[in-house]
Amino acid sequence: GETRENTLGIVQGSTKGGWLNEIGKGQVRRLSEHLAGEHLDICYASDLARTLETAREILRFHPQVLLAPRDELREKAYGVFEGLHRDIYYRARDESGVPFHEFRPEGGETHLDVRERVRRFYQSLFPRHNDHTVLVVSHGAVLAVLYLYLLKLPFEEYRRYRVENAALSVFEIGGPDEVKLLELNAIH
């Protein structure tokens, strides 16, 4: 869901700050109502406040479901750019002369690093969650990279899979290499 920092164009990254604003709370409330009748077995979420707030709202309708915070689902670490306007980050990234997914901000991560984190997380789901409905609550860059990984797509497709606030994507997964995209970035 939307945060104050989102509205100001501030890079939040992997910092602990960034609570949902009133618009974000409404977005998450609508999403949670949409998911109220769905069967969920477990919820994995980033351990950052804004995603835990989102997950807890969704799980209000699923009190029996375990909320499992995971640091592998934290937003990409933008290092020295966290707390600054996103245009400053974009300018530095573009001026670096390296592909966007290889750009490493000082004290931060590349998108390749994020892909390795989400790969480890995804691989940890098998065989523990075969035939389970798993809810993952995370952040824009992390989810876009996860979607590319699941669909075996190159980073050049990143913008196409960019995630909106409180958007829902649904994948049917029959095994580590059996992935079918059913819904992408639906807003409810």
Image (cartoon, grey):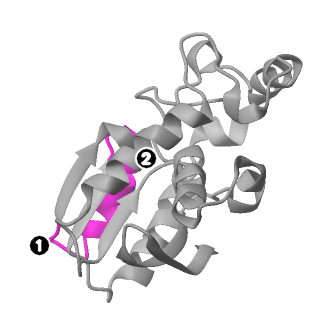
Residue at disc 1, secondary structure = loop
Please tell me which residue is depicted at 42% across the width and 39% down the height of the picture: 117
The three-letter amino acid code for the residue at tag 2 is Val
Placement of 41 over or under 27, stated as above or below: below
Residue closest to the far bottom: 37
Instruction: State the count of labels.
Output: 2
As drawn, the label of residue 64 is 1
Left-right relation of 36 to 4: left
Residue 74: x and y in percent read: 42, 38
The three-letter amino acid code for the residue at tag 1 is Gln
Instruction: Give the residue number, with chain letter if any, for mark 2.
Output: 118
Residue at disc 2, secondary structure = helix
Placement of 144 over or under 167, stated as above or below: above
Left-right relation of 24 to 87: left
- Residue 83 showing in the rendered view: no
User: Mark 1 against mark 2, which lies toward the viewer?
Assistant: 2
Please tell me which residue is depicted at 68% across the width and 20% down the height of the picture: 84
Between 167 and 98, which is closer to the camera in this rendering? Answer: 98
Residue 180: x and y in percent read: 52, 80
- Residue 88 showing in the rendered view: yes
Left-right relation of 38 to 28: left
Residue 139: x and y in percent read: 51, 48
Which quadrant of the figure has residue 82?
Answer: top right
Q: Residues within 10 Å of mark 1 (few under 14, many from 20)?
A: few
Q: Is residue 41 magenta?
A: no
Separation of residues labelled 1 and 2 (CA atoms): 26 Å
Please tell me which residue is depicted at 51% across the width and 37% down the height of the picture: 114
The magenta stretch is 46-65
Between 126 and 19, which is closer to the camera in this rendering? Answer: 126
